[in-house]
Amino acid sequence: MLFNLSRFRLIATLLGITHIRLGHKGGNFEFRPDAPIDSQGLSHLLNKKPRIFQMISPVKLKISGNLSDTDTRADLCEWILETLDPQRPTQEWAEGLQRLDQ
């Protein structure tokens, strides 16, 4: 898990994400105003899963849901980071979004 946390921090820094907080009932991602994230990926999250993902400010993404398991939180964090990565193919994050329905 420690390795994952370090990797998440590195990826987040590259994407302009300043804070990641995920707990039992959800959490949030905070971005620099000039964060080089994939706006299409972010838009897809917000439009396809509005009960889970909401922008509560121009630089803060709120995540809602039951995240009581640490592995679930880690998987979700990794998937969100991949979705926001502008160099990741669109098809891959679309497939990840489908897994949220299961």
Image (tube, rainbow, N blue to C red):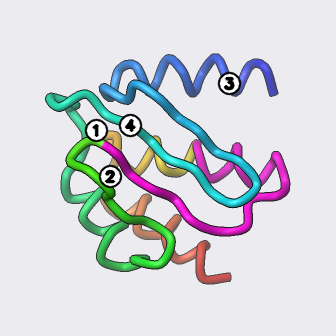
Q: In the picture, which quadrant includes the C terminus? A: bottom right
Select label 3 or label 4 by which is in front.
4
Which kind of residue does numbered mark 4 sit on? Glu
Closest to the observer: 25 or 76?
A: 25
Q: Are marks 4 and 1 in contact (CB under 8 Å)?
A: no
Circle nearer the N terminus (4, 2):
4
Residue drawn at x 60%, y 73% as measured from the top left: 99
Magenta region: 60-77
Q: Which residue, given by chain and number where applicable, does mark 2 sit on?
A: 89
Q: Are marks 1 and 3 in contact (CB under 8 Å)?
A: no
Residue drawn at x 42%, y 60% as measured from the top left: 93
Q: Which residue, given by chain and number where applicable, does mark 1 sit on?
A: 87
Which kind of residue does numbered mark 1 sit on? Gln
Q: Secondary structure at mark 3?
A: helix
Q: Which residue, given by chain and number where applicable, does mark 4 sit on?
A: 30
Residue 100 rendering spot, x and y as whole percentages: 59, 73
